[in-house]
Image (spheres, rainbow, N blue to C red):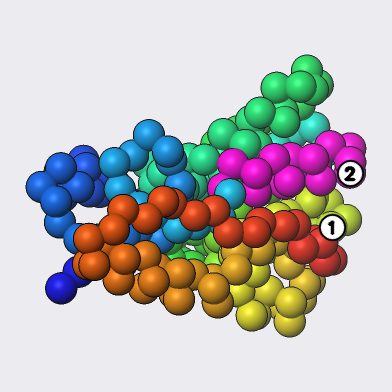
């Protein structure tokens, strides 16, 4: 009867076409008022700003963002990080494009990047899984968080608190998302036009 998409990914044009065709669907991902469909997600731009504010507080000046900005929600996180950096002339921001979201590509591409670039003193990863991979890559070069660099992930998945070192991350209240997505889809199926929703977004400071 209807569709729930988990993440826009690179499917933006398809989702707009579906919306114009009147297909009943909702999206978990980046919330953009300009899009013609209902979406639910964290405040991704704020998440990036929270990470940037943390890096400024820790005195970091060489930042690295790891993630595929072709995905709308990841691009918003990068935009938020850069907005903070723009206020501090001493800060530089590098971007490492990781096309696939699995652990292995994040680890391999981070390690390759580190072998050909000076190590950053702060890293913002598009996910906690990527953050764990980044810790492993840095360890290959004898670098540890938080002594050698600050690290912030995204999502606050359950292993983030139990990992060593425990991950600093941006929390998405995904336990609420499923119910909200279903509720909004039901409203659409009943002929309604629900508005997009932004869920609470906060920084969880741990060891990294």
State the separation of the CA atoms marked 2 and 1: 10 Å
Disc 2 element: loop
- The residue under the point 49% across, 55% down is 197
User: Left or right: where does residue 54 sit relative to residue 128?
Assistant: right
Question: Residue 184, image x and y in percent?
Answer: 37, 65
Which one is in front, 193 or 158?
Answer: 193
Question: Residue 26, image x and y in percent?
Answer: 31, 60
In the picture of the structure, the residue carrying the numbered disc 2 is 58
Disc 1 element: loop
Q: What is the span of residues highlighted in magenta in the rendered image?
A: 44-59
User: Left or right: where does residue 117 sit relative to residue 194?
Assistant: right
Question: Residue 63, image x and y in percent?
Answer: 70, 37
Residue 12 part of the magenta-drawn span: no
Query: How packed is label 2: few (under 14 Cα within 10 Å), some, or many (20 or more)?
Result: few
Can residue 36 be seen here? The reply is: yes
Extreme-front residue of the structure: 191
Extreme-left residue of the structure: 21
- The residue under the point 73% across, 81% down is 162
Q: Are marks 2 and 1 in contact (CB under 8 Å)?
A: yes
Pick whichever of labels 2 and 1 is earlier in the sequence: 2
Q: Is the magenta stretch mostly helix, strand or loop?
A: helix
Nearest-to-viewer mark from 2 and 1: 2
């Amino acid at each position: 009867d209807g569709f729930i998409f988990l993440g826009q990914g690179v499917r933006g044009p398809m989702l707009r076409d579906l919306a114009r065709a009147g297909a009943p669907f909702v999206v978990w991902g980046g919330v953009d008022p300009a899009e013609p469909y209902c979406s639910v997600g964290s405040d991704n731009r704020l998440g990036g700003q929270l990470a940037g504010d943390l890096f400024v507080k820790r005195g970091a000046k060489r930042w690295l963002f790891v993630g595929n900005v072709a995905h709308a929600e990841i691009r918003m996180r990068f935009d938020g990080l850069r907005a903070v950096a723009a206020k501090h002339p001493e800060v530089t921001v590098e971007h490492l494009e990781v096309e696939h979201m699995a652990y292995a590509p994040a680890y391999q591409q981070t390690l390759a990047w580190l072998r050909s670039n000076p190590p950053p003193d702060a890293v913002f990863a598009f996910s906690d899984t990527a953050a764990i991979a980044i810790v492993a890559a840095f360890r290959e070069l004898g670098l540890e968080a938080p002594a050698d660099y600050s690290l912030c992930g995204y999502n606050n998945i359950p292993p983030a608190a139990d990992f060593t070192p425990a991950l600093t991350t941006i929390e998405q209240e995904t336990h609420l998302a499923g119910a909200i997505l279903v509720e909004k889809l039901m409203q659409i199926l009943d002929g309604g036009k629900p508005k997009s929703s932004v869920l609470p977004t906060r920084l969880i400071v741990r060891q990294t």
